[in-house]
Amino acid sequence: MATHPYPDYTSPKSTPYTNAALNPPSVLPRQFFSLILIILLYTTASPFTPISWALCTDTLNLSGTYLFDRLFSGLVLFSAFYFQWRIASLRASSVPVTIPLGGSTTQIRNGRLETVHSSSLDLFLYKTGDYWHFALAEAGMLLLAEFSGSENLRRVVATLTVAGVWLMGWAATPRSVKDWMWEHAKAYLFVLVLDELRAAGRGLFGGVYGMGGGRRRRF
């Protein structure tokens, strides 16, 4: 049987690039480590009251600021837990991290008319291969804040970590999932507002019927 004198360039050859593209690395190790990060973030951040921290409630005795923390802080923190998992589960090679700016436009997507931001501020390009650099740095910061004994450091690290996870997780989350989260967040806030209304009403009617309700006096 005669052999062809020239190499056969027509048959497909496996290359490292095509193999990597067809067989991306498993996300299971990243997802497992994201659970550890969620535990560390919850341990370090709790109690998470960033609005009261920013307004120096401990010094000024502005107890009313805790109303906004009760409404929003838990939602923000637990959304960060989901974003931790979402970042670890990302299969795309890179995702642009941006901040939406003013202005919006409409476009048709999947047969629906949606509002999208027409301009945004590009911050950096997050590459999935850099996950372990960010994850280990986050774990180190959280451990330092938890065991340093400094309350101010704990608050700063917790706030910056949640903000960073939100920034990257928002970019890594599909639009459909964000719409689903927003719909459930509105229902959650509605229930919390009703609960606060009932609490305020109990104080009001308690005062009318002689069951208390008077304002606390500070001495």
Image: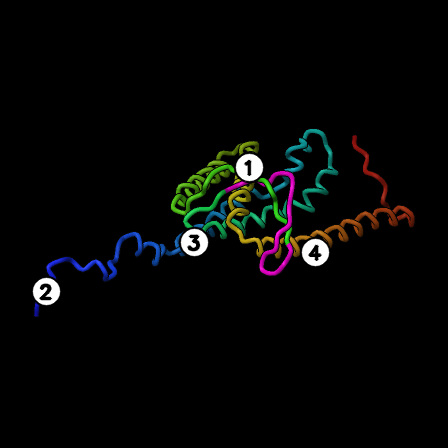
- On whether residue 20 falls in the magenta region, the answer is no
Q: Which one is earlier in the sequence, the residue at label 1 or at label 3?
A: 3
Tell me what residue is drawn at x 63 percent, y 48 percent: 74
Number of residues whose C-alpha sits closer than 10 Å to that of mark 1, classed few (under 14), some (14–19) or many (20 or more): few
Image disc number at residue 91:
3
Q: Position of residue 153 (x, y in %)?
A: 53, 32
- The reply to whether callout 4 and callout 1 are in contact (CB within 8 Å) is no
Q: Alpha-carbon distance for marks 3 and 2?
A: 44 Å
Between 61 and 5, the residue placed more toward the observer is 5
- The reply to whether callout 2 and callout 1 are in contact (CB within 8 Å) is no
Residue of label 1 = 121
Instruction: Look at the magenta stretch and give its main secondary structure.
Output: strand
Q: Nearer the viewer, mark 1 or mark 3?
A: 1
Q: Alpha-carbon distance for marks 4 and 1?
A: 30 Å
Q: What is the number of callouts on the image? A: 4
Tell me what residue is drawn at x 64 percent, y 34 percent: 53
Type of the residue with mark 2: Thr
Image: 180 above or below 51: below
Residue of label 2 = 3
Question: Secondary structure under badge 4?
Answer: helix
- The reply to whether callout 3 and callout 4 are in contact (CB within 8 Å) is no
Q: Alpha-carbon distance for marks 4 and 2?
A: 73 Å
Residue of label 4 = 187
Highlighted range, magenta: 97-113
Q: Alpha-carbon distance for marks 3 and 4?
A: 31 Å
